[in-house]
C-alpha cells in the first residue's frame, strides 16, 4: 500500500515540475517521507535544488543519496555530473563521469558531451573538442547530433588560430620588407 501511495506522490511531483514548483516540492516531500531512498524522487529533488534554487550543495546531497541507494542506475549520473560542473567541483565530476562511463546502459554520447563541458569549464578546449567529437559519433538522434555539432563549433572558435595562418602572415611581412628594400 505504501508503494502505491508513494508512486502517486511521485507522479504528482513529476507532473508538476517545473511549472508548479510548490506542488512539486510538496509532492516530493510526501514521496520521500514514504520512501526516503527512492532514486527518482531524490533525483527530481536534486534537480529542483540545482535548477530552480541554485543550491548546488543541497542538490549534491540528494544526488549522493540517490547514488547510495542505487549506484548502478545510469539515469542518475548525467544530471549529477552537470550539477558538479556548475558548482565547479571538477575533480569530483571527473570521478563520477569515469564511473558512469563504465555502467551498462549509460548514455555514452551524453556523458562524452558532459566530459567536453567539464574540460571546457577547466579551459582545456582541445580536450573538450575531442570529447565533443566522441559524443557526436555516439549520438543516436538528429537533435543530439545538431547540439553536439554546435558545441564543437563553439569550442573551435575558442581555440587559437592555426600556425599555418601565422606562417602565411610572417611570409607576407617578409615579402613586404624585401619589396621595400629592393625599391
Image (spheres, rainbow, N blue to C red):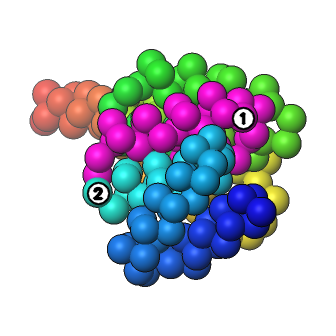
Q: Position of residue 127 (x, y in %)?
A: 53, 28
Q: Secondary structure at mark 2?
A: loop
Q: Closer to the observer: label 1 or label 2?
A: 1
What secondary structure prevails in the magenta region?
helix
Residue at point 70% right, 47% down? 75
Identify the mark nearer the N-term, 1 or 2.
Answer: 2
Q: Can residue 51 be found in the magenta stretch?
A: no
Q: Is residue 145 above or below residue 93?
A: below
**Mark 1 vs mark 2, CA separation in Å:** 25 Å
Q: Position of residue 115 (x, y in %)?
A: 57, 35
Q: Quadrant of the C terminus?
A: top left
Does 104 sit left or right of 96 as displayed? right
* Closer to us: 179 or 153: 153
The label shown at residue 70 is 1
Q: Position of residue 59 (x, y in %)?
A: 41, 43
* Closer to us: 11 or 169: 11
Q: Residue furthest front?
A: 1
Q: Position of residue 169 (x, y in %)?
A: 31, 36
Quarter holding residue 2: bottom right
Is the residue marked by circle 2 packed among few (<14), some (14-19), or many (20+) residues within 10 Å?
few
In this picture, which residue range is highlighted in magenta? 54-80
Residue underneath mark 2: 53
Amino acid at each position: 500500500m505504501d508503494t502505491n501511495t508513494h508512486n502517486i506522490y511521485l507522479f504528482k511531483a513529476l507532473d508538476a515540475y517545473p511549472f508548479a514548483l510548490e506542488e512539486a516540492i510538496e509532492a516530493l516531500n510526501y514521496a520521500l517521507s514514504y520512501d526516503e531512498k527512492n532514486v527518482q524522487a531524490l533525483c527530481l529533488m536534486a534537480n529542483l535544488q540545482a535548477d530552480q534554487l541554485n543550491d548546488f550543495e543541497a542538490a549534491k546531497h540528494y544526488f549522493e543519496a540517490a547514488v547510495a541507494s542505487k549506484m548502478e542506475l545510469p539515469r542518475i549520473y548525467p544530471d549529477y555530473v552537470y550539477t558538479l560542473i556548475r558548482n565547479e567541483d571538477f575533480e569530483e565530476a571527473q570521478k563520477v563521469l569515469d564511473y558512469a562511463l563504465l555502467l551498462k546502459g549509460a548514455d555514452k554520447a551524453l556523458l562524452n558531451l558532459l566530459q567536453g563541458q567539464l574540460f571546457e569549464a577547466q579551459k582545456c578546449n582541445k580536450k573538450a573538442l575531442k570529447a565533443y567529437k566522441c559524443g557526436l559519433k555516439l549520438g543516436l538522434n538528429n537533435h543530439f547530433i545538431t547540439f553536439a555539432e554546435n558545441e564543437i563549433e563553439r569550442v573551435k572558435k575558442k581555440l587559437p588560430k592555426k600556425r599555418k595562418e601565422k606562417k602565411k602572415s610572417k611570409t607576407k611581412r617578409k615579402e613586404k620588407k624585401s619589396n621595400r628594400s629592393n625599391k
